[in-house]
Image (cartoon, rainbow, N blue to C red):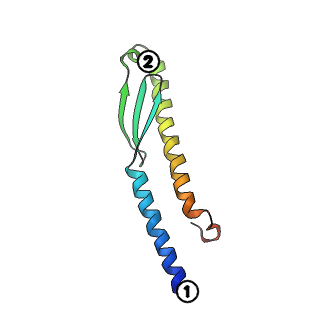
Amino acid sequence: MNPGMLKKLKKMQDEMAAAQERLEAKEYFGKASGVTVIVQGTRQLIDVQINGEMLEEKEMLQDAILLAVNDALKQIEEEQQQTMSQFTGGMGGFGF
């Protein structure tokens, strides 16, 4: 592989790492029926906010928490795929 190609690959690798760090630092908000959760891009749940009315309905609260967390996780997955596809779009044969 020529030095120019190696330099381009190194630059792309550095850009991918920086993009991944930005994604992991970002916070995503999932919402469902009176429940809001905040999940960091690392998929770590960092906050749960519950509307007081939800406390009376245990099963609805449990379902709302699951839906809110899954909503935030879906947002993370979609944004990560979209962001990383800009790097991997034309690199099918390289395993990126």
The location of residue 71, given as percent across then percent down, is 50, 36
Label of residue 2 in the image: 1
Label of residue 70 in the image: none
Q: Which residue is drawn at the image coordinates 36% and 17% (left, top)? A: 52
Q: Do callouts 1 and 2 mark residues in contact (Cβ within 8 Å)?
A: no
Q: Quadrant of residue 49?
A: top left
Name which residue type carries label 2. Lys
- Asked if 85 appears above or below 44 in the picture, the reply is below
Name which residue type carries label 1. Asn
The location of residue 39, given as percent across then percent down, is 40, 40
In the rendered picture of this protein, how many numbered marks are placed on residues? 2
Q: Which residue is drawn at the image coordinates 56% and 66% (left, top)? A: 96
The location of residue 18, given as percent across then percent down, is 41, 62
Assess disc 2: are there few (<14), some (14-19) or many (≥20) residues with their C-alpha within 10 Å of its C-alpha. Answer: few
- Asked if 20 appears above or below 48 in the picture, the reply is below
In the picture as drawn, the residue positioned furthest to the right comes out as 93
- Asked if 77 appears above or below 5 in the picture, the reply is above
Q: Which residue is drawn at the image coordinates 43% and 52% (left, top)? A: 23
The location of residue 9, given as percent across then percent down, is 51, 74
In the picture as drawn, the residue positioned furthest to the bottom comes out as 2
Label of residue 58 in the image: 2
- Asked if 81 appears above or below 35 in the picture, the reply is below
Q: In which quarter of the image is the N terminus?
A: bottom right
